[in-house]
């Protein structure tokens, strides 16, 4: 589903960059966006306060249009 959304964002909407913000503890989602070619750009430390008092870190991933096109062009050859 994420791959289809990225395809739409970069080809139809002509976006230059897509960002994902993921809870640092969510390893499954982090691995999924990394498989799509996203790059970890940084971690926002304790930027979200949860109802139980936990202070969450957020991982910021980014993917540029040229990275998406290069990756998908190489895979289609």
Image (tube, rainbow, N blue to C red):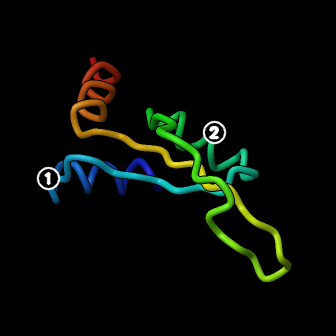
Q: Nearer the viewer, residue 76 or 36?
A: 36
Q: Residue furthest right?
A: 52
Residue drawn 29% across and 19% down? Answer: 74
Residue drawn 54% across and 35% down? Answer: 34
Residue drawn 35% across and 22% down? Answer: 75
Numbered marks: total = 2
Marker disc for residue 37: none
Marker disc for residue 31: 2
Number of other residues with Cα within 10 Å of mark 1, as a class: few under 14, some 14 to 19, many 20 or more: few
Picture layout, residue 73 above or below residue 3: above
Q: Secondary structure at mark 1?
A: loop
Residue 17, image x, y percentages: 27, 47
Q: Nearer the viewer, residue 30 or 60?
A: 60
Q: Decide if residue 54 is on the left or right side of residue 74.
A: right
Q: Nearer the viewer, residue 26 or 43?
A: 43
Q: Quadrant of residue 12?
A: bottom left
Picture layout, residue 20 above or below residue 71: below
Picture layout, residue 2 above or below residue 72: below
Which quadrant, please, contains the C terminus? Answer: top left
Q: Decide if residue 69 is on the left or right side of residue 19.
A: left
Residue drawn 70% across and 73% down? Answer: 49
Name the N-terminal-most of marks 1 and 2: 1
The residue identified by callout 1 is 14
Number of other residues with Cα within 10 Å of mark 2, as a class: few under 14, some 14 to 19, many 20 or more: few
Q: Using the numbered discs, state the Cα–Cα distance from disc 1 to disc 2 in whole angstroms.
A: 25 Å
Q: Decide if residue 71 is on the left or right side of residue 38.
A: left
Q: Residue furthest bottom?
A: 51
Residue 67, image x, y percentages: 29, 30
Asked if the residue at tag 2 contacts the one at tag 1, i.e. Cβ–Cβ closer than 8 Å, the answer is: no
Q: Secondary structure at mark 2?
A: helix
């Amino acid at each position: 589903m994420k791959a289809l959304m990225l395809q739409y964002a970069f080809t139809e909407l002509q976006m230059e960059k897509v960002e994902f913000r993921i809870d640092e503890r969510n390893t499954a989602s982090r691995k999924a966006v990394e498989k799509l070619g996203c790059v970890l750009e940084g971690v926002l430390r304790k930027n979200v306060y949860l109802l139980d008092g936990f202070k969450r870190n957020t991982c910021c991933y980014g993917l540029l249009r040229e990275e998406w096109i290069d990756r998908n062009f190489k895979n289609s050859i």
